[in-house]
Amino acid sequence: MATAAQPAPERGSLHIFGHRDFALFFTAASISNGGSWMQLVAVQALMYDLTHRGSWLGLSTVVTLVPAVILTPYAGVLADRVSRQTILQITQTVQMSMAFTMWGLYVSHVITPWWIIGLGFINGVATGFQTSAWQSFVPLLVPADEMLQAVRLNSVQFTLARAIGPALGGIVVRFGGIGAAILCNAVTYLLVIATLLVVHPRVSKMSSRLQGVMAGLIQGARYMWHRRPLRLAVLLALAASTFGQSLQYIASALSERLFNHSSEGNAGLLTALGVGALLSSGFTVKMGDRLRRSTQTLVSIVLFITSITLLAVTHSYQLGQVAYFLAGVAHLQMAVALNTLIQGTVPDEYRGRAMSFYLLGILAGIPLGSQLLGSLGDAIGFRETLLFDAAAFAAVLVALIVSGWWRDLDATPEQIQISHAAAVGTQR
């Protein structure tokens, strides 16, 4: 079996900006994803102003991400068979069209909650096909021995967008209105589309097209299931997105219900989250491979629990921002630890499918968590709901420590193969 590329020794992550294609894609993606966060701030505020219900925020998230959950495993098979570059060109064009359509509906004063949900559903379909291709495309923009640096910086790119986007979104909404934020997002897609036309990724090993789609999907599922560290990464991604990352999508409701701010106060909370993630990413880039994945993960869960508990007990908007800051630190560390575990141990012909199952955990957890938190918040109160959320996440931490599974997060490619052989032997 092919082995995954290892990180180049004694090289800092910033070295790979010397590769033109990676630098171009990183820059365009940072701006475009920042635009997406601008629109998230604007549309969250718009939806809450139209409905005044936290459950609607949860529903809009569910409808956007459920198509992605359903399609992501199949998209992983597709990403291992056809040009990931072509997939991204198509999906980015669809998402740009949806953003321009939403802007047109808003400025025409005909936007409704159901329009937002309908456009979000189509956007979710594009996301389902895009996410695996995106994650497995980035390593192809640098030499194989610098792959993990590219993976880390791809996480930083999303973090940079998360830090800048909400802040700019809040400013644009305040001075230009919600429509201006949506239009800015639509325009930024052009940067990524143009970049995809000029970059030249290295040729990757593809899985056979003679194999049926379902057979390829089952093969990828077996590959992940028989390797406990990879299986654990998917489960932790599900837990982190359900109990932690979903807080991003109900920020408008928390701003008003917990802190008596307007729904547009979500911009300040999400900006704090982004700043925390950005500072955390700088630390991660500096540390490189010296930071153990198990340490990153355990600390992340503790920070998530602290963040959620602080939100539940404070009445101060400023302390609420501190809580979101801690959540941003936690999210970045968790994402880097789990992403590098998978990308660093999976050969290229399986990478699209491996990432699809990892992303499936994230994409399933966000709508599950946001709908649960939004609906329970409306029914019993958001403070009580957040305390329940923190307790559930604490149970995950206890299970991880008591079982000793946290050690699997530091597994090398060779240890993962031993884990696979042991699992197969047990079945026999």
Image: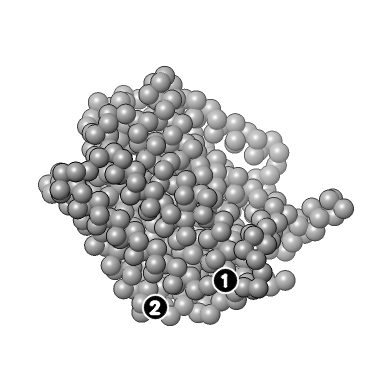
Amino acid type, callout 1: Arg
Q: Secondary structure at mark 1?
A: loop
Residue at figure coordinates x 81%, y 55% from the top left: 424
Residue 239 spot, x, y in % from top left = 55, 40
Residue 159, percent across and down? Answer: 38, 54
Q: Measure the C-alpha gap from mark 2 to mark 1.
A: 19 Å
Identify the residue shown where x is 27% and y is 34%.
48
Q: In this image, 58 relative to 268: left or right?
A: right
The residue where tag 2 is placed is 199
Can residue 361 be seen here? yes
Amino acid identity at mark 2: Val
In which image quadrant can residue 377 be found?
top left
Q: Position of residue 318 (x, y in %)?
A: 28, 33
Residue placed under numbered mark 1 in the picture:
81
Residue 33 image offset from top left, x and y in percent = 34, 57
Q: Nearer the viewer, residue 167 or 238?
A: 238
Displayed quadrant of residue 17:
bottom left
**Can you tell which of label 2 and label 1 is closer to the viewer?**
1
In the displayed structure image, the side of residue 189 where residue 61 appears, left or right: right
| Colour scheme of the picture | one colour
Question: Relative to the observer, which residue lies in front, 292 or 412?
Answer: 412
Q: Quadrant of the N terminus?
A: bottom right
Q: Residue at x 23, y 34 (%)?
A: 49
Element at label 2: loop
Q: Which residue is found at the position 43% from the left and 80% from the top?
A: 200
Looking at the image, the residue that sits furthest to the left is 175
Mark 1 neighbour class, 10 Å CA radius: few under 14, some 14 to 19, many 20 or more: many
